Amino acid sequence: MLKKATVIATLAMTTMAASAQEENRARTYEELAPVVVKYAEALGCGGDGELDALGQKNIARFDVYGLGDEGPSTYVAAVNADFGCYGGSGTTRGHLVVLEVQTLRPSAPTYVLPELSEPIANSVGAPPFFTSLYVKNGQLHATSISYGPDDNQCCPSVREIYRVELSHKEYKHEGGAPKRDYTWNFVKVGTY
């Protein structure tokens, strides 16, 4: 009887923890999505309500600084937009936007880190459209939909998974302060 009660209690605690995680994710999404949309709209166009369709699966908590709990809370968001508003078929593509949340001062605003976000940060091997972002074993991953050999420009059909890594290069101009250039590197690891 005690064993059965322990199993039931464990299941109840697991369910409550999962529910709390979902609630926290929803609250975080509600706070972060408007910041991402505002940033993307300032730099481009979403077209067909794509920016409004930014979902919870497109925002992931990820430690971009590698500082663990010692650093600020950072999130990466994937948004599909036409940065620059070039218009026309095929100009919308996926972009990464990095946000910082001040956890020590909850009343402080959440803001975009432009040096780590596109278009200032570069991307190499990025897919045309993002469908989700997630962290697995401390590594950022993205799912996407890409074009197959017989796909029309409107309708990509190949579902892919990418490992996403942030790298940087430091340089110093003569007499200037050190600077960093950031690059998001996408490595295809499979399909789904």
Image (cartoon, grey):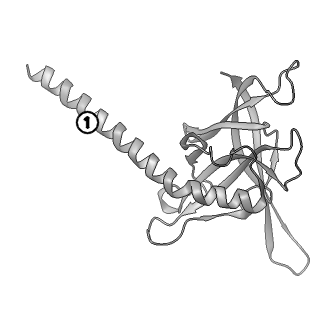
Q: Residue furthest bottom?
A: 175
Q: Residue at x 69, y 47 (%)?
A: 79
Residue 51: percent from left, percent from top: 67, 48
Residue 133, picture quadrant: top right
Name above or below for residue 44 compared with residue 164: below
Q: Residue furthest left?
A: 1
Name above or below for residue 178 compared with residue 28: below
Q: Residue at x 47, y 57 (%)?
A: 69
In this picture, residue 6 sits left or right of residue 181: left
Which quadrant is home to the N terminus? top left
Which quadrant is home to the C terminus? top right
> How many discs mark residues in the rendered view?
1
Residue 152: percent from left, percent from top: 86, 25
Q: Residue furthest right?
A: 174
Q: Amino acid at mark 1?
A: Met
In this picture, residue 62 sits left or right of residue 104: right
Name above or below for residue 45 compared with residue 42: above
Q: Closest to the observer: 27 or 175?
A: 27
Residue 146, picture quadrant: top right
Residue 84: percent from left, percent from top: 85, 56
Q: Closest to the observer: 181 or 60?
A: 60
Q: Residue at x 76, y 23 (%)?
A: 157
The residue beneath circle 1 is 13
Q: Residues within 10 Å of mark 1 (few under 14, many from 20)?
A: few
Residue 160, picture quadrant: top right
Residue 47: percent from left, percent from top: 76, 46
Q: Residue furthest front?
A: 48
Q: Tag 1, which secondary structure?
A: helix
